Image (cartoon, rainbow, N blue to C red):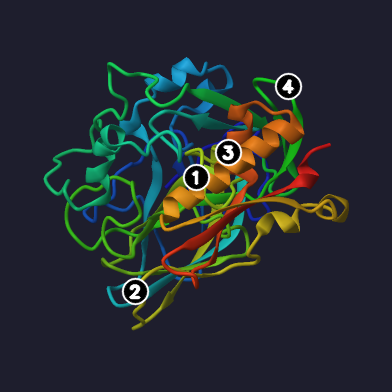
Amino acid sequence: MGGLDVVGSGSPDVLAGPGGDLVVDGYGKVLHNRWNRDLPPVATVRPGEVVQLLCRDALDIGEAARTMTPEGTLTIDLGLVHPLTGPIEVVGAEPGDVLEVEILDVGPLVDFGYVVVSPALGLFGSLRPELLAPFASWSEASQLGEPTAGPASGAIPADQPYNSGAPFLQTFTFERGQNDGYADFVGSDTGRRAPIPIAPFMGIMGVAPLHKGMYRTFSPDVSGAMGGNTDIRQLVKGARLQLPVLVPGAMFSAGDGHMAQGDGEVSGTAVETLMAATLRFGLLKNTVIASPRAIVPSADPTQLTMPAEALARGYYQTVGTGIDLMENVKTAVREMIDWLVTDEHLSLHEAYVLCSVAGDLKINETVDLPKWLVSMTLPRGIFP
């Protein structure tokens, strides 16, 4: 598979190229955005070989994010969500094996990223029955009869374009190829500035599903333990992800590059961007696992980026407790938004965005059943 020369695309630490390994171009064209075990491979690698994947952004809006208005986000075609680079066939992979994906490098192909707040996404935008309905089929094996990877139904009722909240778009800037340090945040509403610690990773890494048919990327349970849209922010450079092989060749794909994300991704997106991922594949033969596993460099990758003086300022922490885990999550996030608005003079939208890209949700304890305790932490050191 030929690579694509992307002007100013940056210099990942490991660069596949002539005389070396494959570069697979999912940047210049969409290769697929549905899981399907019958898709032909776009490249074939042997265990131990390296491949570099060039990937489009999750919403497939690219450069348009630089100038898109908040109202413009309501016109995004959700049928185009999650363009993927692949499938990559791994020679010798068979059902009953484990595919190990070593993440050698992840770096942005462009110098910007974005967060979208939409009434169709996120903790406070999508948790309503009429909005959840179009997503329900994506999380079950109910699209087996979908003949083509065509447009999906819209997720926003035509007669209620704003429904539970106004849309919002926030951009972030950084350097092409940058994979540590900070992204620049300048609040779209207030102009408030904050350096956001980055830890680039791919939100989607997965293998072809066990069952035949066409599946959306929402959510990561369409066919057992194939991986998919997991949005696990610990899968950064240096991590090793293990996935069960469900079809011959494994048929691995990746996409949905995230420059920064907190545990929870509560507003609906991370800092989305176009990304290059450099990977090495290995096989654990005759090994069965029930769900994805990984060895990761850190439970909190941003702590590897933040300097000692920023860490020394500690963290904001808010708490939610009660019998409903999701209500507890919402309480913790609401309290964090309120604190950021009052303490750091952010707008509500800006605070919500920062909760998504720098705030971490944790289940702190389950011992006091039937009540559970959830908290959110956010580093105070990101504010000047």
Q: CA distance from mark 2 to mark 4?
A: 47 Å
Image: 27 above or below 188: below
Query: If you read the primary sequence from the N terminus, does the residue marked by circle 1 or circle 2 appear first?
Result: 2
| Amino acid type of the residue that numbered disc 4 sits on in the rendered structure | Gly
> Whole-Å distance between the Cαs marked 2 and 3?
30 Å
- The quarter holding residue 343 reads top right
Residue position for label 4: 191
Q: Depth check: 72 or 167 in front?
A: 167
Q: Are marks 3 and 4 in contact (CB under 8 Å)?
A: no
Give the mark toward the camera: 1 or 2.
1
Give whichever of discs 4 and 1 has the lower sequence position. Answer: 4
Tag 1: amino acid: Lys
| Residue for point 33% across, 36% down | 128
Mark 4 is surrounded, within 10 Å at the Cα level, by few (under 14), some (14 to 19) or many (20 or more) other residues, namely few
Vertical placement of 297 versus 347: above or below?
below
Question: Is tag 1's residue or tag 3's residue first in the polypeptide sequence?
Answer: 3
| Coordinates of residue 186 in the picture (x, y in percent) | 71, 27
Query: Which of the two residues, 24 or 214, is positioned nearer the viewer here?
Result: 214
Give the mark toward the camera: 2 or 4: 4
Distance in Å between CA atoms under marks 3 and 4: 18 Å
Circle 1 residues within 10 Å: few <14, some 14–19, many ≥20 = some
Visible residue check, residue 154: yes
Label 1 and label 2: CA atoms lie apart by: 30 Å
